[in-house]
Amino acid sequence: MSDLSVGAPVPVRRRQSFFRRNKLVITPLLFIAPAFAMFSLFVIYPIIQSIALSFTQWQGIGPKTFIGFENYRQLWHDPVFWKALVNNIYWLVLFLLAPVIGLFVALFLNQKVFGIRLVKSLFFFPFVVSQIVVGMIFTWFYDPSFGLIAAIIEPLGWTIPSILADENWATIGVIVAGLWPQTAYCMILYLTGLNSVNPEIVEAARLDGAKGWWLLVHIVLPQLRAATFIAIVVTIIGALRSFDLVAIMTEGGPYNSSNVLAYYMYDNAIFRYRVGYAAAIATVLFMIMNVYIAWFLMRLLKSEKGSH
């Protein structure tokens, strides 16, 4: 027996390389690395640089002077900053009408009748046009001399105020213009979500006597939870990032009555050469948006855990 064991071939254990032993960990990291590098270069680095700039006094050229929290102290006492912040809250609240209107438009368009595709394409129109075009269209709508609204109501004996020149109406006028493309975006989300609604559940509810509002609230809307979640989050972020329409329609006026944080930051950086002050405004806006981003990520992680 001892002779046979000596003559048998002994298996040689080849030592595995470091990559083979850790490939389950290294391979995903290699795929993520390019995206993370780009994200760090174009997102994280500018954020850090903007926060650092907010502690300096800088005109865009020349040396920077470190002034600590002086920019934030000036912001605290700046009435235009508080006016812009309040306007951003108006945007936030009124912009949330977009998911509601978008839902009802999507329910209306989710029909199988002749010509509905043509109607859908008309509702898609504001989503594909530029915000600049939207701003110019609504500026014409609101014009008290030759605008569309004036042309409609003047024959009835009514007059329209100069909406964009009125301190009390300018912000509302710009928000209504912003609601048009945002509603179209939410409508597209809901139309996509309606395609995933289970028709068997809806039919079973109808057989049990469900109809109308009860059917919508208790059967259809729970199945549109994902679309609703995305629509609300994107709408909130869009409201806080509002800039284009303000720049096109009012430039923050009259008398800063329609100013928002994004435009006030741009105005200080480009026209007043107060880059450090503008960076402080950007940092405050970033911190406010972080609240919603953190909430969004928490809900996303929670929903993913619940699905497993």
Image (cartoon, rainbow, N blue to C red):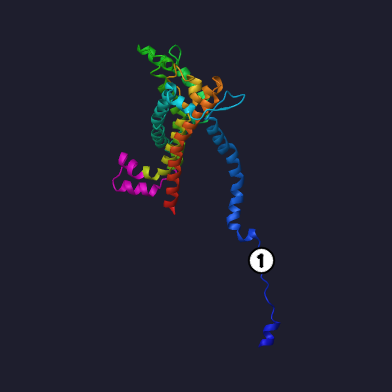
Assess whether residue 216 is covered by the magenta stretch. yes
Task: Please name the residue shown 61% across and 43% down the image.
Answer: 37
Residue 159 in sight in this render:
yes
Q: Secondary structure at mark 1?
A: loop
Task: Please name the residue shown 41% across and 45% down the image.
Answer: 197
227 sits left or right of 132 in the view: left
Q: Where's residue 286, x and y in %?
A: 48, 34
State the residue in front, 71 or 290. Answer: 71
User: From the image, which quarter does the C terminus lie in?
Assistant: bottom left
Relative vertical location of residue 202 with respect to residue 3 in this rendering, above or below = above
**Residue at the right extreme, as displayed:** 7
Q: Which residue position is annotated with label 1?
A: 15
Task: Please name the residue shown 68% across and 85% down the image.
Answer: 4
State the residue in front, 72 or 146. Answer: 72
Amino acid carrying mark 1 in the image: Arg
State the residue in front, 202 or 249. Answer: 249
229 sits left or right of 37 in the view: left
Q: Where's residue 256, x and y in %?
A: 44, 19
Find residue 226 and report its image quarter: top left
Q: Where's residue 243, x and y in %?
A: 49, 26
9 sits left or right of 225 in the view: right
Q: Main secondary structure of the magenta part?
A: helix
State the residue in front, 39 or 95. Answer: 39
Find residue 170 and report its image quarter: top left
Q: Where's residue 300, x and y in %?
A: 45, 45
Assess whether residue 61 is covered by the magenta stretch. no
Magenta segment boundaries in residue numbering: 195-219
Relative vertical location of residue 268 with respect to residue 35 in this rendering, above or below = above
